[in-house]
Amino acid sequence: MAQSTDNLVKAVQAHARANYNEGGWDMIVEAYEPSEIAELIEGATTEAEAIAKVSTIVGIRDDRRQGAINAGL
């Protein structure tokens, strides 16, 4: 059964808080409004799908951040 977007956003936010120090999830906690998370998870119907969609984006952004840190930027 598909969940509401609000519930999926809340699930992503809870996952982000629980994994704050892991792989860039802090960016979701600190920089994303619920409406922005809703855009990222468009098309997801389950919590797992929503988290997976955001995880992909978080991973890319964290890789870029780590590259900048390693380059001394």
Image: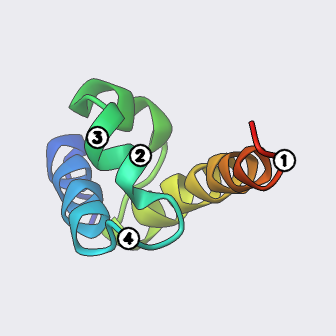
Q: Amino acid at mark 4?
A: Asn
Q: Amino acid at mark 1?
A: Ala
Work out which quarter of the rendered image holds the C terminus and state it: top right
> Contact (CB < 8 A) between labels 3 and 2?
yes
> In this view of the protein, which residue sits in the foreground, 70 or 59?
70
Q: Position of residue 70 (x, y in %)?
A: 78, 56
> In this view of the protein, which residue sits in the foreground, 43 or 71?
71
* Mark before the other along the chain sequence, 1 or 2: 2
For mark 4, give the secondary structure.
loop
**CA neighbours of label 2 inside 10 A, class few (<14), some (14 to 19), many (20+):** some
Q: CA distance from mark 2 to mark 4?
A: 10 Å
Label ID, residue 30: 3
Q: Residue at x 28, y 40 (%)?
A: 30
Q: Residue at x 49, y 44 (%)?
A: 43
Q: Choose top left, top right, bottom left or bottom right for residue 68.
A: top right
Residue hosting label 2: 27
Q: Amino acid at mark 3?
A: Glu
**CA neighbours of label 3 inside 10 A, class few (<14), some (14 to 19), many (20+):** few
> In this view of the protein, which residue sits in the foreground, 28 or 66?
66
**CA neighbours of label 4 inside 10 A, class few (<14), some (14 to 19), many (20+):** few
Residue hosting label 1: 71
